[in-house]
């Protein structure tokens, strides 16, 4: 049932989006992990045939709209990250969770660098230190994201 | 062979999408064509926004519901007293406004006295730590347009930069990408106040060292530039830094509006 499959993926991305726009105090804001990127990395690792570059593209546009960033900013970052992931997922999928988390940190850093570069090109001041916070938090929660989404996938898409 | 072809297909696709994203950013930065896309997706996302603001809204509602009667009575009395004082002041003001209008007529100057105002409420705040944006609950169906000034009861908050049918995005004067033309009330010096990304600070750069500025000077909108109507309070001077080498003064000022805590705001429709 491909429809159900997509429904589950969409739902998980919607939840990730809600986590992204949930209001937080200023000092936590800097450390908010990119939930949408985490979810997207998981799905493109688990179901690369279903969640590919176009999926990343449209998710990015929605994320850009909800974040008030330039249309294309998160899109560019997500497309590049998912492209890298599509080239490596077969080798990464079999690793232990801790090793996977390091790889995810690498992806999230690329994601963050692209977003901050665009901000820089636009001439907006960008924080230097706070900038590493979000990817590191993302790395730390990756094992949980992975386990939760894997269980959801196994329950909802047998076989 | 098959696999290699697939890989090449994916690379081409990735290149295409990367190019497309960059083109989209350029277009979005320079022109207004993508506003439609943004508006439609924003509209589709509004249930999510509602969902996110639900806990806060319910909290407020519960709070209102369980407020003790004595508290309400006290508040009522205080509000009545406030109302009386405000009414008294308003009478004076009406007299002054009339006198002002008469004098202006005498002078032959035609200038608006009051602007039209739309009352709006805050929907959500600033999802991006690099920017200072707020979402308000009035949009193009209520007459809000891009460029309208937004104020609270203390001073100027910002201006509208995106309009959806039921909501609008407002950039605060403290956003690093925002600048507002201002004037010192006391000395009449004109300048431009830049945001610095903090809700408690604006910066006025490159004022001449001879400018007559003191701490606690009040800044109002100058009305130049045509975006903000003139004479609304903006900020109070908190620090003056002299750059003796280059002969400039830069001034830090604290916004009057409560940028981080106001929930009710007014959108001003300028009458020209």
Image (spheres, coloured by chain):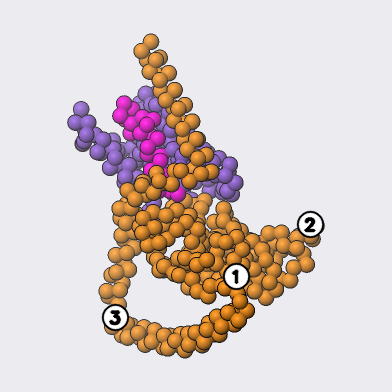
Chain colours: A purple, B orange
In the drawing, does residue B111 fall left or right of residue B64?
right
Disc on res. B246: 2
The magenta stretch spans residue B209: no
Secondary structure at badge 3 equals loop
Q: Please tell me whether mark 2 sits on a helix, a strand or a loop.
A: loop
Are the residues flagged by discs 3 and 2 in contact, CB closer than 8 Å?
A: no
Q: CA distance from mark 1 to mark 2?
A: 27 Å
Per the image, the residue denoted by label 1 is B220
Kindly tell me whether residue A140 is visible in this rendering.
no
Name which of mark 1 and mark 2 comes first in the sequence.
Answer: 1
| Residue range corresponding to the magenta coloring | A43-68
Q: Which chain letter goes with mark 2?
A: B
Q: Where residue A26 appears, x then y in whole percent?
A: 47, 57
Where residue B270 appears, x then y in whole percent?
A: 50, 66
Mark 3 vs mark 1: same chain? yes
Specify the subunit that label 3 lies on: B
Quick one: quadrant of the N terminus of chain B? top left
The residue depicted at 52 percent of the width and 51 percent of the height is: B130
Q: Earlier in the sequence, mark 3 or mark 1?
A: 3
Q: 10 Å neighbourhood of mark 1: few (<14), some, or many (≥20)? A: many
- Image point (62%, 79%), residue name: B107
Q: Position of residue A61 (x, y in %)?
A: 40, 41
């Amino acid at each position: 049932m491909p429809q159900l499959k997509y429904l589950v993926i969409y739902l998980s991305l919607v939840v990730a989006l809600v986590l992204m726009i949930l209001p937080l105090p200023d000092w936590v804001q800097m450390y908010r992990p990119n939930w949408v990127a985490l979810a997207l990395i998981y799905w493109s690792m688990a179901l690369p045939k279903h969640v590919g570059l176009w999926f990343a593209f449209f998710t990015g546009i929605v994320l850009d709209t909800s974040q008030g960033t330039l249309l294309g900013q998160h899109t560019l970052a997500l497309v590049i990250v998912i492209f890298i992931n599509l080239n490596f997922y077969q080798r990464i999928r079999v690793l232990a969770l801790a090793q996977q988390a390091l790889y995810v940190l690498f992806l999230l850093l690329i994601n963050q660098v692209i977003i901050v570069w665009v901000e820089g090109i636009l001439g907006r001041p960008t924080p230097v230190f706070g900038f590493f916070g979000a990817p590191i938090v993302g790395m730390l929660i990756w094992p949980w994201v992975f386990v939760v989404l894997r269980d959801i996938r196994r329950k909802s898409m047998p076989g | 062979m098959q696999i290699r072809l697939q890989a090449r297909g994916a690379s081409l696709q990735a290149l295409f999408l990367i190019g497309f994203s960059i083109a989209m950013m350029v277009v979005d930065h320079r022109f207004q064509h993508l506003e439609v896309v943004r508006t439609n997706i924003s509209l589709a996302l509004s249930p999510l926004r509602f969902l996110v603001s639900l806990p806060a809204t319910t909290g407020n509602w519960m709070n209102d519901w369980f407020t003790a009667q004595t508290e309400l009575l006290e508040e009522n009395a205080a509000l009545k007293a406030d109302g009386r004082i405000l009414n008294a002041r308003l009478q004076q003001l009406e007299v002054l406004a009339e006198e002002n209008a008469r004098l202006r007529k005498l002078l032959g100057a035609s200038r608006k006295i009051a602007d039209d105002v739309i009352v709006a409420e805050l929907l959500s705040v600033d999802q991006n730590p690099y920017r200072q944006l707020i979402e308000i609950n009035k949009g193009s169906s209520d007459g809000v347009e891009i460029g309208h000034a937004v104020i609270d009861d203390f001073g100027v908050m910002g201006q509208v930069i995106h309009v959806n049918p039921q909501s609008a995005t407002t950039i605060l004067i403290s956003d690093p990408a925002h600048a507002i033309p201002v004037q010192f009330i006391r000395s009449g010096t004109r300048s431009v106040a830049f945001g610095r990304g903090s809700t408690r600070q604006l910066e006025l750069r490159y004022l001449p060292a001879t400018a007559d500025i003191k701490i606690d000077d009040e800044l109002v909108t100058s009305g130049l530039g045509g975006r903000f109507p003139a004479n609304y309070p903006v900020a109070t001077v908190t620090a003056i830094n002299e750059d003796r080498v280059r002969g400039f003064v830069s001034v830090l000022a604290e916004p009057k509006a409560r940028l981080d805590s106001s929930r009710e705001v007014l959108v001003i429709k300028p009458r020209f």
